[in-house]
Amino acid sequence: MKLPNRKIVYSGVFVVGIILFVTVWLLTTRTSSLERQAANILRQVESGDASLYDNGYEHERKALGLTPEKVERLYHQLVLPRFAKYKPLGEIRTMVNRSHSQAVAWRRYENEKGQIFDLNVSPWATPEGARQMILARLATAWVVQYRMDRNLDENDSEGVLLAKLEGLKADRAALEQIGIPGLVGDSPSTPFRSWDACEREWRHLLQDLRKTRELRGSSSNH
C-alpha cells in the first residue's frame, strides 16, 4: 500500500491548524469585543450618557419616539437620582454566554445602610453591535427606591410589581413630559404598551400572584 506523500500530510496538518487558529481567534475577538461593548453600555447607564441611545434597539427607539435628548433626560431626572445614595464597589465585571451571543456587565453598589444591588446590562450581539433595552434600568431604579424606602434586602415577585406600580405613579407625569408614552419588549414582535396598559398588566399579575399564594396557603392548612 502506498503511503501518503509527507508534503501532503504536512500541508493538511498546516491547513487544519490555520483553521483552528482562525476559529479560536474569531471567537476570542468576538467575545472580547462584546464584553467591552457591554462594559461601555454600563458606563453610559451610570453616567446617563445620551450615547446610550445609539446602543438601543431600533424597534424600541421607533415605538417610543426616543431621541438622545429624551434618553438623557430620562436618566438624569428619573433613574440616576434613585441611585444617588449608593456608591460603587470595585470595578465593572463582565462575562459572555457560551454561544457568544450575549454579554453581561455589572457593578455592585452599596448605600450607608448596607443595602446592596448589582447595576447591570445584558446586551445581545447584533450585526450593528451590542444592543440593550434603553428603558430597562427605569424598572431597576423603581425597585431600588422601593427597597431603600422599606429597608428591604431582597425583593420577591410581589415586591417587584409593587415597586413598578409605585414608581410609575410617581413618574407618570415626568415620563409624559419627556415624551415617553410607554414600553415595548425585547423582541421587535412585542406590541407597544401604553402606561395605562402597563399599569393594568402589573395589577393583574399582582392579583394573580396573591390569589396563587392564598390558594397555596389554604392547601397547606388542610
Image: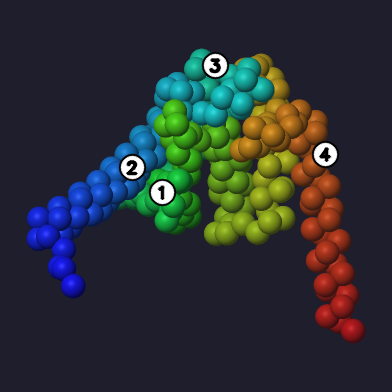
Residue where numbered disc 3 is placed: 67
**Between disc 3 and disc 2, whose residue precedes?**
2
**Residue depicted at 60% across the width and 46% down the height:** 143
In this orientation, does residue 170 appear? no
Question: Where's residue 81, x and y in %?
Answer: 50, 33
Q: Secondary structure at mark 3?
A: loop
Identify which amino acid the numbered label 2 is placed on: Arg
Q: Distance from label 3 to label 1 (Cα)?
A: 29 Å
Query: Which mark is in front, 3 or 4?
Result: 3
Q: Quadrant of residue 190?
A: top right
Q: Which mark is residue 108?
A: none
Screen quadrant of the N terminus = bottom left
Q: Which mark is residue 200?
A: 4
Q: Kindly check if marks 4 and 2 are in contact, taking CB atoms under 8 A apart as contact.
A: no
Question: Where's residue 65, x and y in %?
Answer: 63, 17
Q: Residue furthest left?
A: 6
**Between disc 3 and disc 1, whose residue precedes?**
3
Query: Which mark is in front, 3 or 2?
Result: 2
Q: Distance from label 2 to label 1 (Cα)?
A: 7 Å
Identify which amino acid the numbered label 1 is placed on: His
Q: Kindly check if marks 2 and 1 are in contact, taking CB atoms under 8 A apart as contact.
A: yes
Residue where numbered disc 2 is placed: 30
Around disc 1, counting alpha carbons within 10 Å, would you say few (fewer than 14), some (14 to 19), or many (20 or more)? some
**122 sits left or right of 212 in the view:** left
Around disc 3, counting alpha carbons within 10 Å, would you say few (fewer than 14), some (14 to 19), or many (20 or more)? some
- 191 w.r.t. 210: above or below: above
Q: Quadrant of residue 195?
A: top right
Around disc 4, counting alpha carbons within 10 Å, would you say few (fewer than 14), some (14 to 19), or many (20 or more)? few
Identify which amino acid the numbered label 3 is placed on: Thr
